[in-house]
Amino acid sequence: MIVVGLTGSIGMGKSTTGRLFAEAGIPVYDADECVHRLYSGKAAPLIEDAFPGTVKDGTVDRNELARHVMGKPEALARLEAIIHPLVREMRETFLAQARQNRAHVAILDVPLLFETGSEARVDVVVLVTTSPQIQRERVLNRPDMTPEKLDAILERQMPDAEKRLRSHFLVETGKGVDLARRRVAAILRAMAAIGAPVRSHSEISGPTMGQATADRATASRAMGG
């Protein structure tokens, strides 16, 4: 089974791309969704013990929790020590089920794949990307989002240009869902041709990888590189 790491910075369209893979019949593990479920379940009492007043009606208040950990590395580390083992357990359960179902490809949707070193645990990396302008427009249209909050989030994320260089495939989401859907289909065709786990870029060939290389060059020119 080929384990694919699907990643992308905030506002890049990763959730939509994950749904496109799911529409194509691929099992998708959504790390963000798992955290949401944990915040309403097993993690809630643990977080309340560590950060009193952050749980309301049995569910973690994300805004209140953010006030406890934002800009506080020690507090963030305490939170991660609670969440990461639970997320890892859910991820391994997902992969075991996918293998049992004889899936050829399984998607791990992980926002901070590179930042946490998780690319070492996948065979192929698919990066969801778009222009910085579209990214900012999308994120700033979200409720309770401000330019300052967005900048703080981006500071904790690897630059998109670097992620492009470290990924096997790119999905550009700034040109419409139909184009993104076609790219997903092309990636899946490449996976079917691979037939076995892959670790290096050189093992992937064909139009999909060529398009990814072209995308990287286009992005570099757009960013002045």
Image (cartoon, helix red, strand yellow):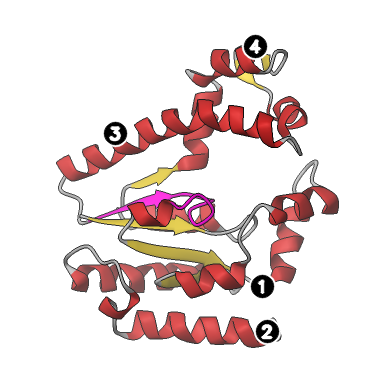
Query: For mark 3, what is the residue?
Result: 93
* CA–CA distance in space, label 1 to label 4: 40 Å
Residue 87 against residue 207 in the figure, above or below: above
* CA–CA distance in space, label 3 to label 1: 35 Å
Query: For mark 1, what is the residue?
Result: 131
Going by the numbered disc 4, the residue's amino acid type is Asp
Give the image location of residue 154, x and y in percent: 70, 56
User: Looking at the image, is mark 1 or mark 4 earlier in the sequence?
Assistant: 4
* Residue farthest front in this picture: 74
Give the image location of residue 121, x and y in percent: 34, 52
Query: For mark 2, what is the residue?
Result: 222
- Residue for point 34% across, 76% down: 201
Residue 57 tag number: 4
- Judging from the image, what secondary structure is the residue with disc 2 in? helix
Going by the numbered disc 2, the residue's amino acid type is Ala
* CA–CA distance in space, label 2 to label 3: 41 Å
* CA–CA distance in space, label 4 to label 2: 47 Å
Are the residues tagged 2 and 1 within 8 Å (C-beta)? yes
Quarter that holds the N terminus: bottom left
